[in-house]
Amino acid sequence: NATLGSTIIQVHATDDDIGLNGAVRYRLKQDLMGNWRTFSVDSESGIILLKQPLDREKQKIYEIRVEAYDLGIPTPLSSDLDLTIYVRNINDYEPQFLVDEMVIKFTEHMPTGMERRKIVDTVDRDEVDELDDPPTPVCYFIVGGNEGDFFTIEPLRHEVMVAKELDREASKQHLILIKATEDCIHSPANQNFFDPTDDTYLKVIVEVEDINDNAPHFVKKVFTGGVTTEADFGKEFMQIKAIDIDEGDNAEVSYYQVGQIQMTLTEGLENVQTPPFLVDQFTGVVQLNFDPQKGMKGYFDFMIQAGVSDEVVQILEMVDERIQEAQVIPERERIRLAGTTLQGAACQWWKVDQDGISTWG
């Protein structure tokens, strides 16, 4: 982009003679490539000027020869200087991202600054070779999104960090908009939207990874169910359910029976040696672990723990013969577990019909 008439360089030669024999003049010598036509030289000062426009895409290097001669009489003397003129590139293009968006992940509840995520590099469409100056540094700035100011970025390292503690259960995904620029002094203006046609911007989706920071909780404190003496060994008759608001493997709930099974008002169950009920570790399904016989009656009260938490739930079970009358479960005493007082079922009415036992109220 140098204008015609611009000074390229000044050459200087000396002559120890005096008078006309020491008067030095300059001229360009013709060359086979015709490079000399692009420049001119002031015959007295030795200043080389641009005579024709330069086009770096067509020619990067010009080699010319400058002759310095004196005005000596009868025969002038001269010497030559070979010059290589390199056409430097101008910064025509801003740094550009090759993708419109990328996804990075941070772990919830990690200390600020502990995790860093590298943002993709930009490309520069300006041509660069070994004769150019070192490339201009590119800086990244957050110019949009980032609600709550949860994230910061190191402009020269291109690394995003957490500025505030993240909580996946509060927000599992965040959005930030990053601007790439060679102006590392002034922060770019904020943007309210992402323009996919402007490759100096990058949309970054931040996903918050889960840790196991929430214990499972049962959907209710007391589960009740019942079977008749006509039920078969292994019958599945109820299911316990707990919910964990974590994600993935951290949300998987396991069920374990804890403590002793309390039996009240039992008849005919003296010879039941094995635990009368089994709880499936993964599904929470409760099934019979003995074969009910006529004449057996009783109420069972036991606790289930979900996962490795201290959350426990009370299970009330009733085994009875198939009869056509209402039964009353007497009020149970308070049970204290893991520092929590749970109230047993009070005056629960059970109706036994052909389909088994169901709670009325």
Image: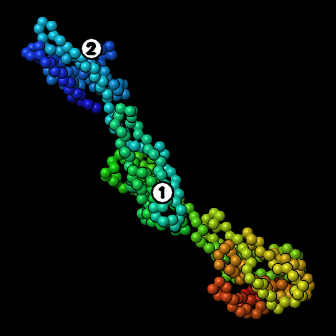
Looking at the picture, which amino acid does disc 1 mark? Arg
Crowding near pointer 1: few (<14 within 10 Å), some, many (20+)? some
Residue 317: quadrant of the picture: bottom right
Instruction: State the scheme by which the image is colored.
Output: rainbow
The residue sitting at 52% across, 60% down in the picture is 106
Identify residue for label 1.
116
Measuring from the top left, give residue 180's x and y in whole percent: 39, 48
Looking at the picture, which amino acid does disc 2 mark? Gln
Q: Quadrant of the C terminus?
A: bottom right
Measuring from the top left, give residue 10's x and y in whole percent: 20, 26
Residue placed most toward the observer, 78 or 322: 78
Residue 30, label in figure: 2
| Residue 255 shown left or right of residue 22 in the figure | right
Residue 261: quadrant of the picture: bottom right
Residue 190, label in figure: none
Residue 260: quadrant of the picture: bottom right
**Looking at the image, is mark 2 or mark 1 earlier in the sequence?**
2
Residues under labels 2 and 1: Cα distance? 61 Å
Q: Secondary structure at mark 1?
A: strand
Q: Secondary structure at mark 2?
A: loop
Measuring from the top left, give residue 292's x and y in whole percent: 89, 81
Does residue 207 lie above or below 21 as drawn?
Answer: below
The residue sitting at 24% across, 30% down in the picture is 3
